Image (cartoon, rainbow, N blue to C red):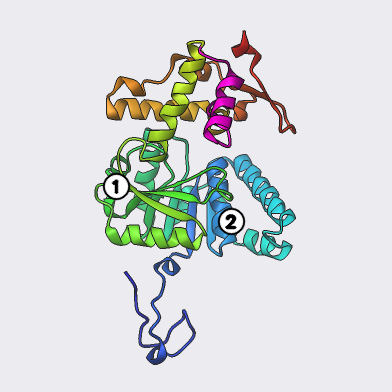
Amino acid sequence: MDIKTPNAGCFYCLLPSAFCLLPIPLYLFMKKIAVIGAGTMGNGIAHVFVQHGFEVNLIDISRSQLDKALLVIGKNMDRQISKGLLSDAQKEESLARLQTETVMINGITEADLIVEAATENTDLKMQIFKQLDTHSSPDCILATNTSSISITKIASVTKRPGKVIGMHFMNPVPVMKLVEIINGYATERAVTEKIIEFTKALDKIPCVVNDYPGFIANRILMPMINEAIYSLYEGVAGIQEIDTIMKLGMAHPMGPLQLADFIGLDVCLAIMRVLHEGLAQPKYAPCPLLANMVMAGKLGVKSGEGFYLYSAGSKDATPSVFLSK
């Protein structure tokens, strides 16, 4: 769907409208963005938005989390500079477009698009979306970065289900090209088209899917990870053997157990529970070892230990002594 320029003149190509037949890309009507949640995904999403010219309010109830996010974004941009992907001037300009806010209402009232990137918890997300619906502009599109929770269910707590959509970015956001776009039951086609164009403007590749548990990415990925955990649990093979077989035999860049550590074992467990509840099949039952590790606080990289041990400042990971007993 293309929008033609008004008779007064074209702000897009700077020519009088009588001479302008160019369509205006729909994403140009979304200039102000709010990102809810300053964790790994939220700061990565904000990074990509400001780097591509959009003004962003990054919102989190924790000031310390926001400060940490700014440091992470700065370091990641420095890494891009060292690789020749970004200049010092572009970094400075990008960071100037980024604002932080601890009070959600203050950061969303002028937003054209809001992307929620809070913890993968259904009740929390529905609570957030109620507030977003109440305090944002009626024309604002409400997106969620959920990797498994029903878009339709989240949209049901709003008065604008047609303007609610999933934008599932991949981690690390500045590097990974894919954005899984999820249509809820009521998502308007025009909204989907805008988000597709917007995603392309971020130099990402959109893939549109429908709203069923796990969508595509996690419906396929998480059972594979869960089966790898079952293989360890049942003593079929050890941590390194499982990961090495998948890396060398299947050309995966990272083994499933180490990938689970990077995703977060708590996140993996939450997604498996969504799949198990939503699809009601025994094959989606989370492995007891996964549940026990989460209860024990062994969450992967974020806690320093999961299937592997991670030491600060080191890129090397060694298999967990606890699991090797």
**Neighbourhood count class around disc 1 (C-alpha, 10 Å): few under 14, some 14–19, many 20 upward:** many
Kindly tell me whether residue 322 is visible in this rendering: yes
Secondary structure predominantly adopted by residues drawn in magenta: helix
Is residue 242 on the magenta stretch?
Answer: yes
Which of the image's four quarters has the N terminus? Answer: bottom left
What element does badge 2 sit on?
strand
Say above or below: 255 vs 291: below
Q: Amino acid at mark 2?
A: Gln
Callouts 1 and 2 close, C-beta under 8 Å: no
Could you tell me which quadrant the C terminus lies in?
Answer: top right
- Horizontal side of 117 relative to 153 (left or right) equals right
Q: CA distance from mark 1 to mark 2?
A: 30 Å
Q: Residue at x 71, y 50 (%)?
A: 79
What SS does tag 1 mark? loop
- The local crowd at label 2, few if under 14, some if 14 to 19, many if 20 or more residues have their Cα within 10 Å, is some
Instruction: Name the residue beneath numbered marker 2.
Output: 99
The numbered disc on residue 56 is none
Which span of residues is magenta-colored? 236-257
Q: Position of residue 37 (x, y in %)?
A: 51, 43
Left or right: where does residue 81 sit relative to residue 207? Answer: right
- Tell me if residue 300 comes above or below residue 175 in the rendering: above
Q: Which residue is mark 1?
A: 184
First in residue order: circle 1 vs circle 2: 2
